[in-house]
Image (cartoon, grey):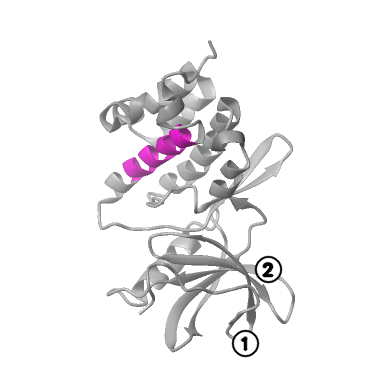
Amino acid sequence: MAKRQGFGLSPGDRLTWRYEVIERLGAGAEGEVYKIREKATGLFRAAKLYFKSRHGSRTAVRYARKLDALKDCDIVVKYLHTEEVRIGDRFIDCLISEYFDGGSLEDLLATYRGKRMPAFEALNLIYELTRGVAEIHARKEFHGDLHAGNIFVERRGVAFHLRTIDFHEWGRSPAVERRADILSIIRLLYDLTGGRAHYRKQIAPVREICLGLRSDLILKKFPSIYHLRAHLETFEWA
């Protein structure tokens, strides 16, 4: 069985006869994502490799169907196909999707002094993330695993363009999962702006969204992703 610490693929490794590994992009609760090159065309793709679980290939199939259902959502990577690949003596479920030319939010944050984004930039990025997740929620779906390691960011001028490469289902109801997405987005804003060490001195617009990470207060103020989006579009700067 694949170990939770990862598959250990390195640049130059083959992923079937069709693909070459370029680099590891990130990881989520269900597996790892690699940047790969299609050998026949030279085109870059993304490959999600699934950890073995008691659910077998059902996880990969469910994920593929979810990506296909959300193909019109800008924040969701575009699904291409699924296959089984061999890594050592193991056969692993692998989902191939488009490659998004951007780095992870985790890597982007590491480029800032003290790993802390200026509040205006962080709010701008969180707004783009909220817009993207709102499209998912509008289809009665959810993400389920939003964190800085599986959100990819490309900067164009003053704008952030985002893609997400991972979804997860924890066995909770869709309504609970959608509320969890809201809490995850707000936790990201909290972390991007410096977390606990800087929160007390943080500007009011950030504190009025993060609310000390009190989930009861957050969900009362933002009972849906649309309430959060509306707030980000209309709050007044002091």
* 26, above or below 216, in the image: below
Q: Residues within 10 Å of mark 2 (few under 14, many from 20)?
A: many
Residue 185, located in which quarter of the rendered image?
Answer: top left
Instruction: Give the mark nearer the N terminus: 2 vs 1.
Output: 1
- Tag 2: amino acid: Phe
Residue 23 percent across, percent down from the top left = 61, 67
Inspect the magenta stretch and tell me whether residue 79 lies in it.
no
Q: Is residue 163 left or right of residue 91?
A: right
State the residue at coordinates (42%, 25%): 209
Residue 59 percent across, percent down from the top left = 36, 70
Q: Residue furthest bottom?
A: 89
Element type where label 2 sits in the image: strand
Prevailing SS of the magenta stretch: helix
Where's the N terminus, which quadrant? bottom left
Residue 53, located in which quarter of the rendered image?
Answer: bottom left
Residue 30 percent across, percent down from the top left = 39, 65
Q: Residues within 10 Å of mark 1 (few under 14, many from 20)?
A: few
Camera-nearest residue between 13 and 55: 13
- Tag 1: amino acid: Trp
Q: Which mark is residue 52?
A: none
Inspect the magenta stretch and tell me whether residue 184 lies in it.
yes
Element type where label 1 sits in the image: loop
Residue 180, located in which quarter of the rendered image?
Answer: top left
State the residue at coordinates (43%, 48%): 146
Residue 222 percent across, percent down from the top left = 36, 29
CA separation in Å, label 2 and label 1: 15 Å
* 131, above or below 101, in the image: above
State the residue at coordinates (47%, 27%): 230
Q: Which mark is residue 17?
A: 1
For the record, the magenta segment spans: 178-191
Name the residue that disc number 2 marks: 44
